[in-house]
Image (cartoon, rainbow, N blue to C red):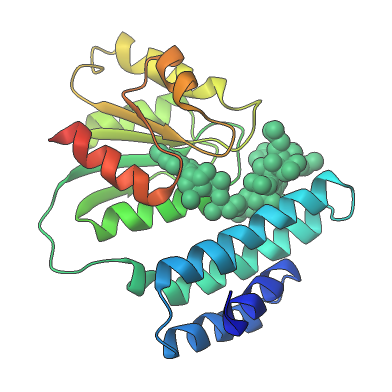
Amino acid sequence: MSQEIQELFDAILSGNAKLAMDKVQAALDLDQDPSQILNQGMIAAMAEVGEHFEKGEYFVPEMLIAARAMQQGLSILKPHLQQSDLVSEGRVVIGTVKGDLHDIGKNLVAMMLEGAGFEMIDLGTDVSAEKFLAAAQESSANVVAMSALLTTTMPNMKTVIEALKKAGLRNQVKVIIGGAPVTESYAQEIGADGYAADASRAVKMTKTLLS
Ligand code: B1M
C-alpha cells in the first residue's frame, strides 16, 4: 500500500474528514488507480471500523464520524470512478431497506451504476416496500436495487419482492440485492434476480440482467 493510501486509511479510521479529502486528492495527483484508492484506502478502513466496533473499542459516534470522513473522501473520488459520455442503459430504483440507515455502500453502487449510464432514482435509506413499489411504478423502472447492512433488515428485501409480485410488477422489473450480510444463496432464497458483492459487480450484474 502506498503512503498516501495508508494515510487515507488512517484518516478514515480516525474520522478526520478534511484529511481524508486531502489524502484522496494527493493519491489522485500521484496518478494512483481510483479503484485501488477506494478499495485499499477507504472500504478497507470501514471494515476495520466495524472490527473495532465489534471488539467494543469503537462506539456509534466513532462509526458515524468515520462514515462522514468516507463520504467526504468519496465526493473527491466520485468523478474518477465514473465514465462519461454514456447513453442511458436503463432506469434503476435504489434504496436501503426499511429499518436500515447504512448508505455508504448503497451510494457507491448508485454512483457506479450512474457512471455506467443508468438513470438512477435514489430513495435513500429506511425505504419501505410501499415506497419501492410506488417509485418502480411511477418511473417504469427496469431494475429495483436494494441494499441491507443489518441481518435484522435483510428480510425486508423479501417484503419488497412480495409487494412487487402482488402489484403484478415482478415480471417487468429485475431485482438485484447486496450489502455485507447478503449472499448469493439468500438472493435465490427470496427470489431476487441477482446478487452482487460489491459496486463494480453490481454494475456487471445489472448489465447482464438487462441484456
Ligand atoms: Co453500523 N453496523 N450500525 N453503522 N456499521 C455494521 C453494518 C456492523 C456489521 C458493525 C459490526 O458489528 N461489526 C453491525 C451489523 C451487525 C449485523 O447486523 N450482523 C452494525 C450495527 C450493529 C449497527 C447499529 C445497530 C449499532 C447500534 O446502534 N447499536 C446501528 C443500526 C442503525 C440502523 O441502520 N438502523 C448502526 C449504525 C451505524 C452508523 C449510522 C453509525 C454508520 C452508518 C453511516 C452511514 O452509512 N451513513 C455505521 C457504520 C459506518 C457501520 C460499518 C462500520 C461500516 C459500513 C460501511 O459503510 N462500509 C459496518 C461494519 C462493516 O460493514 N464491516 C457497520 C463500507 C461500505 C462501502 O461497504 O456497505 O458493505 P458496504 O457496501 C459494499 C458491499 O456490501 C456492496 O457494495 C458496497 C461497495 O463495495 N453493497 C451492494 C452494498 N449494497 C449493495 C447493493 C447491491 C450490490 C452490492 O445491489 C443493489
Q: Nearer the viewer, residue 112 or 28?
A: 28
- Above/below status of 183 relative to 45: above
Q: Residue at x 47, y 19 (%)?
A: 185
Q: Nearer the viewer, residue 202 or 153?
A: 202
- Of all residues, the one furthest to the top in this rendering is 166
Decide if residue 141 is in sight here. Answer: no
The residue shown at (40%, 74%) is: 33
Residue nearer the viewer, 67 or 27? 27
| Quadrant housing residue 172 | top left
Q: Quadrant of the C terminus?
A: top left
Residue 126 x/y as whole percent: 55, 37
Could one spot residue 24 in this view of the protein?
Answer: yes
Task: Name the quadrant containing residue 63.
Answer: bottom right
Measured as percent of width and height from the top left, residue 190 is found at: 44, 15
In the image, residue 179 sits, relative to residue 165, either above or below, namely below
Does residue 12 appear left or right of residue 21 in this picture?
right
Q: Which quadrant would the N terminus be assigned to in this image?
A: bottom right
The image position of residue 65, as x and y in percent, is 72, 65
Image side of residue 206 versus residue 107, left or right:
left
The residue that appears at 32% across and 27% down in the rendered structure is 175
Q: How many marks?
A: 0
In the rendered structure, the answer to whether residue 94 lies left or right of residue 159 reads: left
Q: Please tell me which residue lies in front, 179 or 37.
A: 37
Relative to 126, does residue 172 appear above or below in the rendering? above
Query: Which residue of the protein is positioned furthest toward the right in this rendering?
Result: 56
> In the image, is 188 to the left or to the right of 16?
left
